[in-house]
């Protein structure tokens, strides 16, 4: 079923792109293409996490990366009811509804044989415990090895070495599984390409500071999740440069979306259909930045590829003590002229939800309206459009009262 | 060894208490509140592990006066946020986040050893006296001895009827972890004598034997519920049960920090580090070793590490024909009657 969805999605997007060549459409075409590649019998398939694994390392091999979380959880965007039916499969064998719907859906898809086969499963110890756990559970089903890249809480000489050494060992494992020889120069080139893309992305992030905002907000958040799948590939830079060009054109032509309120979005954006976009459009609210969409990782040193990729992981806002996350949020607030901050709250995302109060304290100190918007990423049984509307309307009212 | 500098609290069994002892503090596994409160809900999150919430509520409501410092670990998502909230809302004399790796291979062991050195340096400064090699080696020896006594008692639980009730043995382990050292050591020796003096060959009808597997538990409620039915609990594969006492630290190693890292990251691992298959294999081994008739899997509510493993474990144990019951708990057993009914039905099923 997943393969069918992605085949149809790719075909539809290619038609759309011919009629209206937009970078965000190209990004989604790439996503579908990467997923479909994983179903090819002649490819070595490495399951991984696009948003938390240094993808440059995989770009240095001829492998098909596959993100089980994202692949399964685009389903609710097509059909939220079917997604619930699939989650039910996982729940029937004992997966509690207290655990993340992202993982219940992935396990359900796997039980129904919707996923491509895995030759090796790579995950990371952040963002959450559940992702790495699911990786291990699925690995057992395929009789393959699951490796979790363990990212410590703090940046130090020892922690950089520890992560870099793990990456070196993962390289050896990929060589073993694929029979391909690792080429250090190719990895350096991938990091070089990734650095160029980062610079292009930086231009986009700067343009997003313009008011009215030139680019629709949700694709920016999506890009922070999907975008890294292309890290180390030439097309990543091109897509970002196209986005920059599209944004500049909008600014020049005076065609940005009407903007009354600028908000920062924290944590995830639901993949199931919701009323959020509709309410934002109606009220002139733009999401100008997501905390993971910020350029937080800096240029990578191509001469020290493993250490650079280790640092990329260690600098993620979701690694470490809350101060690292708060630092990023504060920087965005300083740079993006915001009217409010929304923290999306999926109740199974415990590490994120348990930081809401601490973030709220900082927002209070900075006198910025802050909304904890509860819902669920993929499970429509845990989402109420009426409640979402009520919370957002109240929040918009608060922002309006301060204008 | 320096004189006692006070009580140093810790939450996770990955913390090497030997370093705390060597620094002159008494290591105390922190139990948290004995009853459910909503205190932590507002500052953490309602859907958090009840053990984490209980620790936080206890500190908010009663202060941290009981302790001279606290050691946190990167055990799980909840523990990371507990540390953040603690720093923000609870004044502490000393707190330290110990970087316990989530893997257990040689890279992780080397990294953990480096973090243990840092921990020893920091806690040594907090105590006012640097930890010396002999101090640490002495502490390793002491801790090995205490754990060895508990292991000895557990190893005698292979007979039925048990020489020592499971609830009694579990409670004794809790006393040791909770830092009630001298009394607990006396009790351990007394129990050893009692067990050694019993005539194993005699003694009445064999009982139904149930193993409890899970994570953190600070009270023997489930043990007592099982024992009230006439069944017995020879072994508890819990963070606060047998697992805590199975570690043996190499006393002759040239680098005590490496020895500690190897022992603490080595088997037996909890579901935080172990893949579900590893957990299953350990349960399965213990089923054979302790001649168990049935297994009760228990998990703290909202403990992802456990909840993700449960379907796998249920499936594998069912395939083996090992009767198994899964019971979620909220740490303080507010729904004890419901759990009791399920346990009674389970034992009845085993008896039939």
Image (spheres, grey):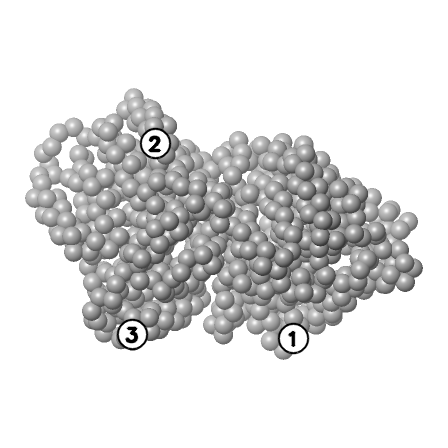
Label placed on residue B336: 2
Question: In this picture, is A318 found above or below A104?
Answer: below
Q: Quadrant of the N terminus of chain B?
A: bottom left
Nearest-to-viewer mark from 2 and 1 = 2
The residue closer to the viewer here, A1 or B116, is B116
Indicate the secondary structure of the residue bearing disc 1. Answer: loop
Disc 2 is attached to a residue of which chain? B
| Residue indicated by mark 3 | B128
Distance between the alpha carbons at the discs numbered 2 and 1: 59 Å
Q: Left or right of B189: which side holds A1?
A: right
Find out whether the residues at labels 1 and 3 contact each other: C-beta distance under 8 Å.
no
Q: In this rendering, does residue A261 appear at all? A: yes
Parent chain of label 3:
B
How far is disc 1 from disc 3 in space, using C-alphas?
Answer: 44 Å
Residue labelled with disc 1: A302
Q: Alpha-carbon neighbours of circle 2 within 10 Å: few (<14), some, or many (≥20)?
A: some
The percent position of residue B124, horizontal first and vertical second, equals: 31, 72
Foreground mark, 2 or 3?
3
């Amino acid at each position: 079923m997943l393969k069918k969805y992605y085949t149809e999605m790719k075909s539809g997007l290619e038609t759309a792109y011919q009629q209206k060549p937009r970078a965000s459409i190209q990004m989604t075409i790439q996503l579908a293409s990467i997923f479909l590649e994983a179903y090819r019998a002649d490819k070595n398939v490495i399951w991984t996490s696009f948003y938390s694994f240094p993808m440059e390392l995989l770009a240095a091999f001829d492998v098909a990366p596959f993100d089980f979380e994202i692949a399964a959880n685009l389903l609710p965007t097509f059909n939220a009811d079917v997604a619930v039916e699939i989650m039910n499969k996982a729940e029937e064998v004992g997966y509690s509804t207290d655990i993340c719907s992202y993982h219940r859906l992935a396990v359900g898809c796997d039980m129904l044989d919707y996923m491509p086969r895995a030759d090796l499963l790579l995950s990371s110890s952040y963002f959450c415990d559940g992702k790495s756990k699911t990786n291990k559970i699925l690995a057992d089903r395929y009789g393959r090895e699951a490796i979790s890249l363990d990212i410590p809480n703090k940046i130090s000489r020892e922690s950089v070495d520890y992560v870099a050494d793990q990456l070196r060992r993962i390289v050896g494992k990929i060589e073993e599984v694929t029979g391909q020889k690792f080429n250090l120069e190719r990895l350096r080139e991938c990091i070089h390409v990734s650095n160029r893309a980062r610079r292009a992305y930086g231009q986009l992030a700067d343009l997003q500071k313009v008011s009215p905002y030139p680019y629709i907000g949700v694709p920016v958040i999506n890009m922070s999740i999907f975008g890294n799948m292309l890290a180390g590939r030439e097309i990543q830079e091109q897509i970002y440069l196209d986005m920059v060009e599209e944004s500049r054109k909008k600014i020049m032509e005076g065609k940005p979306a009407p903007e009354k309120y600028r908000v920062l979005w924290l944590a995830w954006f639901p993949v199931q259909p919701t009323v959020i976009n509709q309410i934002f459009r109606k009220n002139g609210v733009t999401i100008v930045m997501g905390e993971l969409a910020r350029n937080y990782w800096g240029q990578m040193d191509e001469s020290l590829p493993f250490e650079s990729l280790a640092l990329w992981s260690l600098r993620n806002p979701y690694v470490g003590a809350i101060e690292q996350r708060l630092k990023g949020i504060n920087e965005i607030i300083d740079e993006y002229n915001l009217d409010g901050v929304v923290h999306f709250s999926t109740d199974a995302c415990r590490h994120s939800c348990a930081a809401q109060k601490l973030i709220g304290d900082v927002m209070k100190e900075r006198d910025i309206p802050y909304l904890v918007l509860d819902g669920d990423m993929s499970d429509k049984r845990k989402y109420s459009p009426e409640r979402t509307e009520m919370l957002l309307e109240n929040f918009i009212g608060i922002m309006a009262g301060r204008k | 060894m320096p004189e006692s500098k006070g009580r140093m609290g810790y939450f996770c069994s990955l913390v090497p208490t030997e370093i705390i002892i060597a620094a002159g503090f008494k290591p105390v596994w922190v139990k948290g509140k004995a009853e459910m409160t909503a205190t932590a809900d507002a500052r953490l999150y309602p859907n958090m592990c009840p053990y984490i919430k209980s620790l936080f509520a206890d500190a908010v409501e009663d202060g941290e006066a009981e302790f001279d410092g606290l050691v946190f670990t990167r055990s799980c998502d909840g523990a990371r946020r507990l540390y953040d909230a603690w720093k923000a809302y609870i004044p502490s004399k000393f707190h330290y986040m110990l970087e316990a790796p989530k893997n257990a291979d040689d890279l992780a062991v080397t990294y953990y050893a480096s973090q243990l050195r840092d921990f020893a340096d920091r806690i040594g400064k907090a105590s006012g006296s640097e930890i010396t090699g002999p101090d640490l080696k002495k502490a390793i020896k002491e801790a090995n001895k205490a754990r060895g006594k508990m292991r000895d008692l557990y190893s005698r639980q292979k007979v039925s009827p048990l020489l020592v009730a499971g609830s009694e043995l579990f409670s004794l382990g809790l006393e040791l972890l909770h830092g009630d050292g001298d009394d607990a050591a006396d009790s351990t020796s007394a129990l050893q004598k009692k067990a050694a003096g019993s005539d194993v060959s005699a003694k009445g009808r064999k009982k139904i034997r149930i193993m409890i597997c899970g994570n953190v538990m600070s009270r023997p409620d489930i043990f007592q519920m099982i024992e009230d039915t006439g069944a017995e609990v020879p072994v508890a594969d819990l963070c606060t049960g047998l697992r805590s006492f199975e570690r043996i630290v190499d006393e002759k190693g040239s680098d005590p920090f490496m020895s500690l890292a190897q022992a603490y990251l080595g088997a037996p691992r909890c579901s935080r580090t172990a893949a579900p298959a590893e957990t299953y294999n350990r349960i399965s081994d213990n089923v054979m070793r302790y001649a168990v008739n049935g297994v009760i899997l228990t998990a703290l509510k909202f403990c992802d590490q456990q909840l993700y493993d449960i379907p796998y474990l249920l499936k594998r144990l069912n395939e083996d024909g090992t009767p198994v019951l899964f019971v979620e708990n909220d740490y303080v057993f507010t729904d004890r009657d419901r759990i009791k009914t399920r346990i009674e039905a389970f034992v009845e099923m085993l008896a039939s």
